[in-house]
Amino acid sequence: MAEVVLYHHIQGLTEGVRSFANELRAAGHTVHTPDLFDGRTFATMDEAFAVVRGAGEALDANADRAAQALPEELVYAGISWGVGAAQRHAQTRSGARGALLYEACLPVTGENAFGPWPNDLPVQIHGKADDQFFTHEGDIDAARELVATIGPDRAELFVYPGNEHLFIDSSLPTYDADAAGLVTQRTLHFLSVL
C-alpha cells in the first residue's frame, strides 16, 4: 500500500477533498490531507485567489512543513492549485514514489520549472478537455511535454470530456461523478503498481 500526501485545491480542504482522500483510504492506502489554509474554505475561486495572493510565500512554507513532518517515501498528489506543492515536492524531495496531478500540471522545462523531472518517478495527470484552467492556460501542454519527456511507460495523461474545473470535488457544483469515478479507479491502479 502507498502513503500519499494530498494537497487541496484553492477553495480549501473541503468535504469533497476529504471524501476523495477517504476513497483512497478505503482501498488501504495511507492518505495525509494537510490543511494549508488553517481550516478556512472559500465559497468561490475568486474569493480564494484574493486570499492566496495576499498570503505570499506563507502557503508554500505551510506545504513544506507538512511534507517535512511525513516519511520520505511518499506519493505527492495535488488538486488544481495544490498541484504546485505536489509537483514541487515530487521533483525536489528525495524518496518520492510517484505524483498524481489533478486538474493542473506545471512546466518541467524553462526558467520557472522546479528542475528536470526525475526519470524514475511515475506520474499520472488528469484534466478536462475544455477546462479553461487546464487546457487554455497551458497546463495540458505542460502535461503533454512531461509525458513526452519521460515516456508513456512512466507518465499517463487522462483527458475527460467537459469544461468543469474541480470536477473531482463532490462538495462543489462542478463535480462530475462519472469522470471522478474514472479518476479514482485510475488513481487506485496507479497506487497499486508502485
Image (cartoon, grey):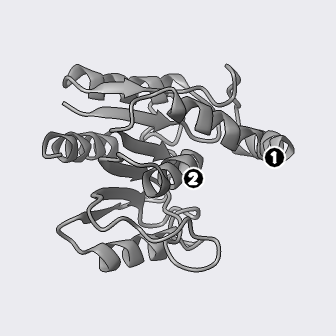
Please identify the quarter of the rendering in which residue 127 is found: bottom left
Write down the residue under mark 1. 56
Question: Tag count in the figure?
Answer: 2
**Closer to the camera in the image, 154 or 140:** 154
The answer to whether residue 57 is above or below residue 140 is above
Within 10 Å of disc 1 (Cα), the crowding (few <14, some 14-19, many 20+) is few
Please, which residue is most extreme toward the right here? 54
Identify the amino acid type marked 1.
Gly
Residue 188 x %, y %: 21, 39
Please identify the quarter of the rendering in which residue 35 is found: top right
Q: Which mark is residue 84?
A: 2
Please identify the quarter of the rendering in which residue 157 is found: bottom left
> Residue 3 vs residue 138: left or right?
left
Tell me the quadrant of the picture where the N terminus can be found.
top left
The first of marks 2 and 1 along the sequence is: 1
Q: Which mark is residue 41?
A: none
Identify the amino acid type marked 2.
Gly
Within 10 Å of disc 2 (Cα), the crowding (few <14, some 14-19, many 20+) is many
Residue depicted at 47% across the width and 73% down the height: 142
> Residue 37 vs residue 85: left or right?
right
Where disc 2 sits, the SS reads helix
Q: What is the spatial separation of the Cα atoms under label 2 and label 1, in whole angstroms?
A: 14 Å
The answer to whether residue 17 is above or below residue 56 is above
Where disc 1 sits, the SS reads loop
Residue 4 x %, y %: 35, 34
Residue depicted at 30% across the width and 68% down the height: 119
The answer to whether any part of residue 14 appears in the image is: yes
The answer to whether any part of residue 167 appears in the image is: no
**Closer to the camera in the image, 130 or 53:** 53
Residue depicted at 40% across the width and 24% down the height: 19
